[in-house]
Image (cartoon, rainbow, N blue to C red):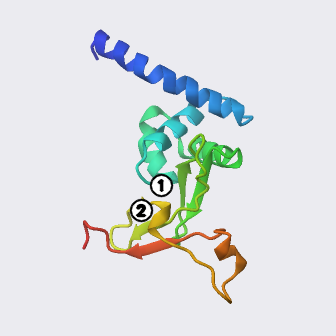
């Protein structure tokens, strides 16, 4: 790598690094390189990531499966990451963004052919309560999961 490129990369990454470290410490955890790496990957993700996805993404940086799993568990318990089982018995993880009410309550779409998962805008599914519907539905304490063929498989 050229010296000039490395310097530019550091300057753009440094503020994010400090932000991740502050978020981790504010949650009562020690800021470690694996935790920062997991948060960084989830920050850049366009859809929820499984443990296996994170192992693939971070394995080249020297983090093993167990280290990534333990850090995902710690970050989830600390409230920095939310996890969801989208019906296929695979936990998927998403970053809980600062100031965001993201609690995993937005709907997800899973392609039944290729398995891709996408977050849908909260307003894409409307939940209304009516007589006989459990109170959890009206309080939005439910998870909505849609399944079908994605545009690529359709």
Pick out the residue farthest to the bottom.
132
Identify the mark at residue 48; answer none if there is no mark: 1
Q: Quadrant of residue 115 in the image? A: bottom left
Q: CA distance from mark 2 to mark 1?
A: 7 Å
The quarter of the rendered structure image containing the C terminus is bottom left
Structural crowding at the residue carrying mark 1, measured as other residues with C-alpha within 10 Å and reported as few (<14), some (14–19) or many (≥20): many
Total tally of numbered discs in the picture: 2
Q: Are marks 2 and 1 in contact (CB under 8 Å)?
A: yes
Q: Position of residue 59 (x, y in %)?
A: 45, 40
Provide the secondary structure element on which disc 2 rests: strand
Question: Which of the 4 quarters of the picture holds residue 129?
Answer: bottom right
| Quarter of the image that includes the N terminus | top left
Q: Residue at x 32, y 74 (%)?
A: 149
**Residue at image x 64%, y 75%?**
137
* Above or below 47: residue 31: above
Q: Is residue 119 left or right of residue 79?
A: left
Where residue 63 sits: x, y (%)?
52, 37
Q: Is residue 70 visible?
A: yes
Residue 63 showing in the rendered view: no
**Number of other residues with Cα within 10 Å of mark 2, as a class: few under 14, some 14 to 19, many 20 or more:** many
Q: Secondary structure at mark 1?
A: loop
> Residue 153 bears which disc, if any?
none
Position in image of residue 122 (x %, y %): 50, 62
Disc on the earlier residue, 2 or 1:
1
Vertical position of residue 55 compared to residue 139: above or below: above
Horizontal and vertical percent position of residue 28: 75, 34
Residue position marked by numbered label 2 in the rendering: 117
């Amino acid at each position: 790598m050229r010296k000039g490129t490395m310097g530019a990369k550091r300057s753009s990454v440094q503020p994010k690094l400090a932000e991740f470290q502050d978020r981790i410490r504010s949650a009562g955890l020690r800021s470690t390189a694996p935790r920062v790496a997991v948060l960084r990957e989830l920050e850049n993700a366009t859809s929820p990531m499984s443990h296996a996805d994170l192992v693939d993404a971070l394995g080249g940086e020297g983090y093993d499966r167990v280290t990534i799993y333990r850090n995902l568990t710690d970050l989830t318990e600390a409230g920095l990451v939310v996890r969801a089982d989208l019906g296929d018995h695979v936990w998927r993880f998403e970053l809980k963004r600062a100031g965001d009410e993201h609690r995993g309550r937005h709907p997800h779409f899973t392609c039944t052919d290729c398995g891709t998962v996408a977050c849908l805008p909260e307003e894409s599914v409307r939940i209304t309560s009516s007589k006989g519907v459990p109170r959890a539905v009206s309080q939005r304490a439910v998870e909505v999961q849609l399944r079908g063929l994605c545009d690529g498989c359709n």
